[in-house]
Image (tube, rainbow, N blue to C red):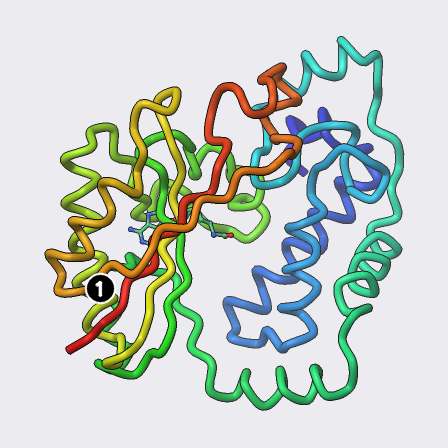
Amino acid sequence: MPEDLLVFYHPETLAQICALREYFLEKEAANGMDSVDQWIRMVAINRLTGHSSGFFSVYTMPPNQAVSIVSQRKINEKRKQIPQVRNITDIILKKSKSLVKDLCPSDTENLRKTSRHATLLTRDSRRTPEIESQSVSLVVTSPPFLDIVDYATDNWLRCWFIGIDATSVPIAILKHLSDWKQHMFEAFQELARVLRIGGYIAFEVGEVRGGKIKLEEAVIPCAVNAGLEPVLVLINQQEFTKTANCWGVENNSKGTNTNRIVLAKRCS
Ligand SMILES: C[S@@+](CC[C@H](N)C(=O)[O-])C[C@H]1O[C@@H](n2cnc3c(N)ncnc32)[C@H](O)[C@@H]1O
């Protein structure tokens, strides 16, 4: 049991999490993961840490923004909290029920049918040889916004749980706009290849650097240079509570506050 993790979990909860982790790692190594295992693992990585009793941990950040051990120690001291025992089986069951509660029998059937042909890839979007040329009608995607989010550090706990070395994942963290544009151009070239004529790409970005850089303005030339026609830019501004609000960042002030979706079409 990695004792450092006791800042997040009660010892009994951590023992259960470690047992579940080992079980999945062993099954995966033996190519024995079935769909039920995959579901449970998906739900479990979503419940690793969070801000309520619906998560395995004491009060903290969500699992895609897991704080470091040192920061969690500070949170515990400040809030005078110690991790309580959680029943991880009950939590996984409850979350599973809520995830499927809106599915009607025809949705389930459609998902079952579609999943037989679905291809799930975890790789650099600039090289996807598994996807046939001109086979896709619609691409919906969102790239990293320059270097705003450190995905590897934010996901360290999830990576521990599923046995991935975050440093081995080629994540684009690009500080300079010119490098970012080059990377996006290469991604657009690959997307244009897989898109069928008449197909669309919805490419979501945001404003960064205090609103000085509107990434959609950088995206449009990348799409055009890859042979696509820009159709429209949809800007969505709304009242919302940012995750960064927990660190005292006001909504609609700093950070990214709008969604900017560039719609591009492959015409020839
Ligand atoms: C703005 S987020 C979009 C997240 C996505 N919409 C979702 O809901 O999961 C950008 C994502 O791009 C991923 N990413 C970074 N570099 C990439 C690359 N070269 N190819 C594909 N994805 C990449 C990051 O890890 C991150 O998950």
Tell me the residue at 43%/38% (across/down).
152
Quadrant location, the C terminus: bottom left
How many other residues sit within 10 Å of disc 1, few (<14), some (14-19) or many (≥20)? few
- Coordinates of residue 96 in the picture (x, y in percent): 78, 63
Front-most of residues 124 and 218: 218
Tell me the residue at 51%/75% (across/down).
31
Front-most of residues 152 and 32: 152
Tell me the residue at 72%/53% (across/down).
19
- Coordinates of residue 265 in the picture (x, y in percent): 27, 68
Identify residue for label 1. Answer: 127
In the image, is 59 to the left or to the right of 169?
Answer: right
Position of 240 relative to 264 (above/below):
above
In the image, is 59 to the left or to the right of 73?
Answer: right
Quadrant of res 230? bottom left
Position of 90 relative to 13 (above/below):
below
Q: Is mark 1 within 8 Å of ligand 1?
A: no
Position of 162 relative to 14 (above/below):
below
Tell me the residue at 82%/50% (across/down).
88
Front-most of residues 192 and 11: 192
Residue lying at the far front of the rendered structure = 232
- Coordinates of residue 213 in the picture (x, y in percent): 29, 28
Classify mark 1: helix, strand or loop.
Answer: loop
Position of 7 relative to 117 (above/below):
above
Quadrant location, the N terminus: top right
Residue type highlighted by circle 1: Arg
In the image, is 152 to the left or to the right of 66?
Answer: left
